[in-house]
Image: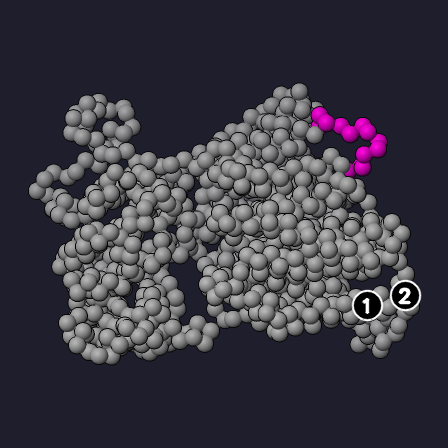
Amino acid sequence: MYYLITLLVYGAVDAIACLGLSQQFGVAGVTNFGFIIFQAVGAYVAAVLALPPDTANGGFQIYVGGLNLPFPVPWIGAAVAGALLALPFTFLVGRRLRGDFAAVGLLVTAVLLNLLATNYRQLFNGDAGVSLVPAPLAAQRSMFVTTSNAYQYEFAAGAILLAAVVYLFVRRITESPYGRTLRAMRDNDKVADSLGKNLLSLRTGAMVVGGAIAGLSGGILVSFIGVWSPAAWSYAETIVLFTAVIIGGAGNHRGAVLGAILVPVGFEEITRFITNNNPSLPPNLLPSLQWVAIGLLIVVFLWARPQGVLPERKRVIPPPPTLAQRMLHRVPGQDVSRVRQRTKPPAPGSAAAASEAGSPVRSRRSRYPRPTGDGPEILQAIGVSKDFGGVHAVSGVSISVRRGTLTGLIGPNGAGKSTLLSLLAGTEKVSAGKIIYQGRDITALPAYRRARTGLVRTFQLASEFKRLTVLENLLTADPANRGDSFLGAAAGRRYWLADEARAVDRARALIDSFGLTANANDYAGDLSGGQRRLVEIMRALMSEPDMLLLDEPMAGVHPELARKIGDALRGLCQDGMTILMVEHELAIMDEFCEPVIVMADGGVLAEGTMTELRDRTEVVEAYLVG
Amino acid sequence: MRGKDMSLFVASVGFGLITSAVLAIAALGFTLQFAVTDVLNLAFAAVMTLAGFVAYWVNNAGLSVWLGLVVSMAVGSLVSVLLNYFVYSPFQRRGSAPITLVIVSLGMALIIEFGVAAIVGGVNVSYAMSQGSTLRLGGMTLTTVQLTIIAISLVVMAGVHALLRYTKLGKAMRATAANRTLARNCGIRASRVIAVTWALTGALCGLAGTVFAIDIGSFDPFSTDLFLILILAAVFLGGPGNAYGAMLGALVIGLATEISAGLPFIQADYKYVVAFVALLAMLAVRPTGLLGART
């Protein structure tokens, strides 16, 4: 009987830990190889909050704290400790560091903290660890009661209940606009940055939430087993949890629970039934082979089924019902119809209808009033340079882009066009020079904050969020969604549903106008090259930009479609948007762009209309020679 | 500093030099492997363990441990080539993210390390060998074996320098490290260069495994776990992928850990903390390392 209860509690604890890891690794893409230290600190903190001062019991163990606090304070303390421990590590998972380097840093931290806890006895009794941790509510019940079956069942039920609460919580976060932003960051962090997402804050959030959940799992575990020592949290335990999440299905929280049942529980328990009675075999054969099996599981699963047993679910947003369907669904009660009714289009003739129906693309100039006194230039670069280890990719470039123009940027390969675009958007920092946007010096602003002021770029290489649908790709760029923050997500669906519905309508209108309606619910990674370019342009437009920086938006696009895109862009400029566009195809420049800036060897060679430029020999030479 | 402390200090400098020597071989192998193949191979220390035990089996068969050392280099080389051929390379060809390869390498580390443990059990072993005569050098006491280890390390460092600087293969390796696609377009057979790199760095890994085992005297399948931390610290201190940085990093980390262990106010158990702080500080402040390019 007792064995069954133990299994249930272990299963619940492992499920909670795996849910935290699934949220952190599977959803947000933060690879935390030190995950186990968050569980460990939760367990230690819960232990010393619940234990009496260490002078009790004859002082056979030493530890800090010993506050003798009643349940549930230790468990709350465990979660808080896990969350707080995450903060010092945010510098590792911040913007600048490669994900695998950060992972190595966290792995090393886990090994070293374990070593420290083993050797430094004053903190948590060193190698032997803390023991005799009181069970929850033990003071109210006698020793005999806490070891009774009834009490144990209650404990198991409580742990499972908490696992369910954690499951609902991470699901609420993941299925919100904020969760979608996390998944976008996981798929391509640089692009998320360019759309106005603050990577540092998103990753900090992922570390803190994962840390709190891991801490809670440690608190529950220590209350049940009563002891906690460094041997319980070697770095290898992190690998077990990773194996569970990978096998279950990273990014699918049900998969995380399944993985928890299959790997840590199954892994620990199956060996109870296999005993090594053969004296001719080496002594540690079975435990060693267990770990070999874990290693094999990781490698084989990542090869044969990287998406796990339960892959991440595709978030299909149903198309808006036709009028006839809406009539049928008048009766409330069905989820879809309820959502649709809330979001049905505003009455014709209203101001909102005019702005929504007229063009799906809005500029946010209303929210960023044009500063008085600035000239017709919306964006200026003054003496901007960029060096890459001695190579002057861009040197002393000064350009200005006038409001409402579709300005072209041409030049031979290696002229520095894409680098200049990166400097203007803030993807790269300038080595020297100044960038003025809307009359304001933005040289020091990071990319995501430039995007938030309406200066948005696209990339030359494919940059769609692969494991998000086309619709979701667009929705990530929605600049004002109440659900696109941790607190907004935690507040629940009702809090952000109206914003979401508005964004969905706007995204659908964009998708319809670019002719991708049939692909709205396809994964962006599955589209053709030309379609992906479209997704990127639509996503940039979705962010309600004042000015777009487009890096070869028509590369690899069918000429007919390229013309359509050009027409659309020109239309946007007539409505007041400004576009600076890098393009190789001179025919496109001829037809759509005025003025055109020519770059060569990192500098500006000439500027003017295409007709003027064709008459200038140095421009023609640069193009032909370069 | 009082006389006793002083002699302790000098002695720990001696220990530090030997640790640095062993570390330099391993860090060079690791960093070249990463630079050319783009795999942050966390199974490196596990292969070292395997190689150390191969040398032990050779030694156990009644042969000299120095012969075992040569065999362990061959085994390290072979295992690394096979790792690449059957595991890492297929993942890379499929376009897996770097972080996926790191997770895969952790899985391989478990398979190799616990595979060795399954065979040998959890017992400590040591080579049957003579430590040679003891030499006193300005307060440091070094055995002939320890001096040999330092000499081997110096030869390895000079060899790597000559390889990278003066040979066609070294140039091809540097080109592949800088830009694989470009190297391929310039007529370098990148996949062959990568395979040769695995063989070379694998040999260094095997060599490091055996000299490490010689140095610490008594070892078990898990002895290299903490040594991996030192390797990573040395590699990241010098800048991942930078061979000269790895040499410098090994010297700094080797000396810093042993000297801190010898200081009167630091307990010997905490010597790894120095490496840990160095690693995290570099990651936070300058991920490209001391000798790396500025970002």
For marks 2 and 1 on the same chain, the one whose residue lies earlier in the sequence: 2
Q: Chain of mark 2?
A: B
Q: Is residue B16 magenta?
A: no
Q: Residue placed at 49% from the left, 47% from the top?
A: B94
Prevalent SS, magenta region:
loop
Q: Position of residue A163 (x, y in %)?
A: 52, 32
Q: Are marks 2 and 1 on the same chain?
A: yes
- Please tell me whether residue B89 is drawn above or below residue A372 in the rendered image: above
Q: Position of residue A98 (x, y in %)?
A: 50, 58
Dot 1 falls on a residue whose secondary structure is helix
Q: Amino acid at mark 2?
A: Gly
Q: Residue placed at 22% from the left, 36% from the top?
A: A343
Which residue bears the numbered disc 2? Answer: B132
Q: Between B129 and A4, which is closer to the camera in this rendering?
A: B129
Q: From the viewer's perspective, is B262 left or right of A368? A: right
Q: Give the class, few, some or many, for how many residues have Cα within 10 Å of label 1's Cα (few <14, many ≥20).
A: some
Q: Residue placed at 36% from the left, 70% from the top?
A: A414
Q: Amino acid at mark 1?
A: Thr
Q: Chain of mark 1?
A: B
Task: Quarter of the image for the C terminus of chain A: give it.
Answer: bottom left
Quarter assignment of residue A27 = top left
Mark 2 and 1 residues: CB-CB less than 8 Å, in contact?
A: yes
Q: From the viewer's perspective, is B240 left or right of A226? A: left
Q: Between A207 and A462, which is closer to the camera in this rendering?
A: A462
Query: Which span is picked out in magenta?
Result: A272-284
Which dot marks residue B148?
1
Let me know if residue A498 appears in the view. no
Q: From the viewer's perspective, is B265 left or right of A515? A: right
